[in-house]
Image (tube, rainbow, N blue to C red):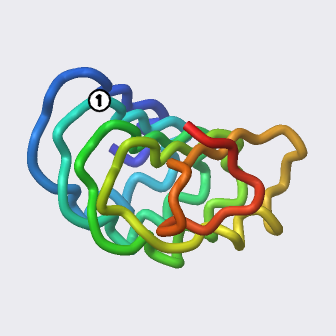
Amino acid sequence: MSNLVDIRLFGNSFSGTLSSSMGELTALKLLSLYGNRLEGTIPTEMGLMTALTFLSFAQNMMSSSIPSSISNLSNLFHLSFCNNEKLSGSIEQLCNTTTTKRFHYQVDRKPSIICSCCVPC
């Protein structure tokens, strides 16, 4: 699976947690988990997925703190954490390290996620 570049699992009502082994998908460019029932934490190992350009956790039930390793994903142009009520943390470092001038980061308008370059959901 080292050559896998695109995973779109949106709108399937999948439940469960994300595995830390996702970090092994280092060639992955698009990961869309929008509209499921995923819960728990975002694995720190996701910071190893440096080829990612599109990442959506929107409309899930993720909780805990966003791992600081997310700031390693400097190729991202789209990132969405919308409608994950218990998610918190900062993605402020991405605002300063992104390699592209065209990006779209989305977070809910609440003080639990810090991001000066994000647009509201």
At x 40% / y 39%, what residue is drawn?
58
Residue closer to the observer: 98 or 86: 86
Residue at label 1? 35
For label 1, the SS is: loop
The residue at 29%/27% (across/down) is 9
Q: Quadrant of the N terminus?
A: top left
Question: Outermost residue, right direction?
Answer: 101
**x and y, in percent, of residue 12 in the image:** 19, 23
Residue at the limit of the structure toward the top, as seen here: 11
The relative height of residue 45 versus residue 26 in the rendered view (above or below) is below
Frontmost residue, 25 versus 77: 77
Q: Quadrant of residue 14?
A: top left
Decide if residue 107 is on the left or right side of residue 85. Answer: right
- 115 vs 14, left or right, is right
Q: Residues within 10 Å of mark 1 (few under 14, many from 20)?
A: some
Question: Residue at point 33% right, 37% down?
Answer: 59
The picture places residue 8, in percent across and down from the top left corner, at 37, 26
Q: Give the quarter of the image for residue 54.
A: top right
Say which amino acid is labelled 1. Gly
Q: Can you say which quadrant of the picture contains the C terminus?
A: top right
Residue furthest bottom as drawn: 68
